[in-house]
Amino acid sequence: MSKDIKIKKGLDIKLVGEAERVVSDAPRSRTYVIKPSDFHLVTPKMLFKEGATLQAGEPLFYAKKDPSIKFVSPVSGTIIEIKRGAKRVITSIVIEADGRDTVRELPVLDVNTASAAAIKERILESGLWPFIKQRPYDVIASTQTEPTAIFISGHNSAPLAPDYNFILKGKEAALQAGITALSKLTSGKIHLGVAKVSDSVFSKLSEVQMHTVSGPHPSGNVGTLINKVSPVNKGETVWTITPENLAIMGELFLTGKFNAERIISVSGSSIKAPKYYKTKIGAEVSTFAYAAGIDGDNVRMISGNVLTGDQVNADGHLGYYHTEFVAIPEGNDYEFFGWNKPVFNKISSSRALTFSWLFPNKKYDLDTNTNGEHRAFVVTGNYEEVFPLDIYPLQLLKACMVQDLDAMEALGMYEVAPEDFALTEFVCVSKQPHQAIIRKGLDLMHEEIG
Amino acid sequence: MGLKEKLHGIKEDFKGKKMAPAFNALHTFLYTPDETTHSGGHVRAVDDLKRTMNTVIIALLPVLVWGIFNAGYQHYAAVDAAQGVLREASLFGNFFTWDNFIMGAWTVLPLVIVSYAVGLGVEFVFAVIKGHEVEEGYLVTGMLVPLIVPIDIPLWMLAIAVIFGVVIGKEVFGGTGMNILNPALTIRAFLFFAYPTWMSGDQVWVHGAKAAAGGPDAISGETILGAYAQNSSVIYDFSDKFFGFIPGSVGETSTFLIIIGGLFLMFSKIASWRIILSAVVGAAVMGLIFNGVVDQGWITEGSNFYGLMSTPFWEHLIIGGIAFGIVYMATDPVSGSQTNTGKYWYGFLIGFFSIMIRVFNPAYPEGVFLAILLMNVFAPTIDHYVVQANVKKRMKRLKLKTA
């Protein structure tokens, strides 16, 4: 049975440079990097020193607070460097691939007959637990709490989003294995949001509650799905996992091997030939970026999508959770009287001498200019136009800024993740860093309330 | 080296120095900054606060231009009337003339210049002392102020009021975005309470009215509201009132152009249509109540309130400053209600109280600015109850689950 979720509030940001539906093999990356900062609030405890050799799927480090949560290497090779930042915090672990691709093998587990405890044990042991995130707090799921439900968004509505039906084709069995496994870890349901039930890779999945979601971005955000299906209450925990990572998890159950392969979309207006590349978690971005070709040298490279991704350099590496790479022009230039002349080449949610409302299907070539300076909150009512959750976004942001825990709790902080505020940040006239404000607020709550 | 590079060089030199905000304000006026995103999303929509404020100024330009011509027109009409000649208003015959424009510009532009020079001066001083950027709020306030004062207000009074309004109305709260009261109305209120004789009566609404009123048949130069409040008859017909061939504060006379400006602001999504719509409804409801009171015969011609109470409810919306107040003042997002539901209540009560104060205020027959200031104070309370409804829903959900 499927339920329809239709949202009206939101904004589709259409950008030039969408990936063509062709997959190429990215050149092999020499080094792979795991950045502990990808795992928010995790303090890593290393299991190996520099120089150690290890197989793909072998644990690199574990979380200091919960040693059962392990983080594994995507490839076989040698740890050549453990980079540290201020206060000796580990910033990245560099692994030089040996090219042999030896994988640590675990016994195959039949998810249909295995017990919940065995499945949980296997996910932890294999190092795939970090793929499961939880709300509240949008961090790696706690191993101690049972989720009331699990949410998966099978519909990516973000700008230049990769097409799940394309990249997950042929992984139906793995997806099903992953779902069957996860369904044993919750007494609630697994909710899956899809754009269209028929002819998608998700159409034949069982043991899930399907929801057809439609409408502008953020209709594909898992946060929107949660809010519309069953919002998180105080004291509850729900889990989320992305379909790509679910497939990797399912494959582990079917084959016993951790397959760090990712088909990522390489897109954006600064990419000469935007298309899909087959690569691995943590690979050097230069491998596929230069294979696809980059226009100009004043370019912002992003691991992840343009609304929530991380800035990377050409010698940087793909983020652990990222399945997209985008390159767009940097906007570090002045524009003469840019604040008062009519604008045709940028997106606006207002109609103040801006004309994007006239061309809803036009694709834009946006750069990274903020189009204005940071200001106090002045304009009201514009966030609500792009924010479909039943929450007051401005009031919640202000509660976070003044660190009013009671107000944050009352206004729905348990239900949100920073990515839910990506669009309000996009349209913000005062150019406030909404996602950073929410992240800080969540961290504060995590610390104070737990 | 182009201007762009030169300014960039100066900006780099100024970085971290005390005068940096002052220079940046001028720099960003010419060029949008070269700032790029560094946290969260990598792209941003085009609108910034300058564009938002600029859109309001664009919406104010028609009434400013009309105000300039009308100032000249009213002056010459008063001079004619003093000699016993009645001027028939005609748009291209005797309204849009060079004489009117020059006379109007001579009286209105100094108000604009004083308002901007003094107001921005205070803003710059605060920005430099407190080390924050010069925020754009005063761009709109500075344009509103000359449009809501009588034409013959002395410039020094205006300057003092502007200083008071910007400092007490805005900067003490932390600047643009933090103020509780609408700064332009704070300035207006200061003038009203500090110099009441200059803000009412029949001497200040027409430039040179005092001098012109030498003859016995002199046109009084009174506003329509003033006349109604005195239960005296009005010589202006509907089209005079609607299009604005009448004396009054500089920018509020032409309801027609205010409606055009309001439609533009609502279309561009800069002003909240919720506030404007519900304020009009609120004013109409109060007007209808008063009309009903008169129809019932509870108030008769002998009463002080008869003139304004018997004014048809729709006419209340056309005369006086209410249209201007609703479109340009009530929609101020900082001092107004912030939630969409709250905006309906906020607007409705502004309209409702505007007409009520207008009718019952014995000293001064206008209510919109007091009504908006009153609702500014109550806006956070309205928002509180709206947000609490959402919070309660969340609590209820939790109870249902745990019960």
Image: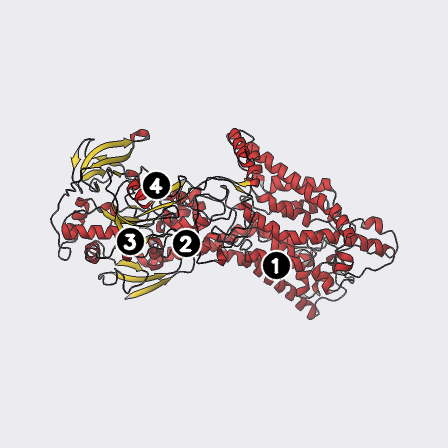
Q: Residue furthest left?
A: A107
Label 4 in the same subunit as label 1: no
Q: Which mark is residue A14?
A: 2
Can you tell which of label 2 and label 4 is closer to the viewer? Answer: 2
Can you tell which of label 3 and label 1 is closer to the viewer? Answer: 3
Three-letter amino acid code at the position of disc 4: Glu
Q: How is the image coloured?
A: secondary structure
Whether pointer 4 and pointer 1 mark residues with C-beta atoms closer than 8 Å, the reply is: no
Query: Residue B95: where, in percent of width, then height?
Result: 76, 57
Residue A305 vs residue B216, the one in the foreground: A305
**Which chain is mark 3 on?**
A
Can you tell which of label 1 and label 2 is closer to the viewer? Answer: 2
Three-letter amino acid code at the position of disc 2: Lys
Whether pointer 3 and pointer 1 mark residues with C-beta atoms closer than 8 Å, the reply is: no
Find the distance from the CA under tag 3 to the CA under tag 1. 61 Å
Query: Residue B326: where, in percent of width, then height?
Result: 61, 56
Find the distance from the CA under tag 2 to the CA under tag 3. 20 Å
From the viewer's perspective, tell me whether residue B80 is left or right of residue B14.
right
Find the distance from the CA under tag 4 to the CA under tag 3. 48 Å
Whether pointer 2 and pointer 4 mark residues with C-beta atoms closer than 8 Å, the reply is: no
Disc 1, SS: helix
Looking at the figure, which quarter contains the N terminus of chain A? bottom left
Can you tell which of label 2 and label 3 is closer to the viewer? Answer: 3
Q: Which mark is residue A22?
A: 3
Residue B112 falls in which quadrant of the image? Answer: top right
Disc 2, SS: loop
Identify residue for label 4.
A448
Find the distance from the CA under tag 4 to the CA under tag 1. 45 Å
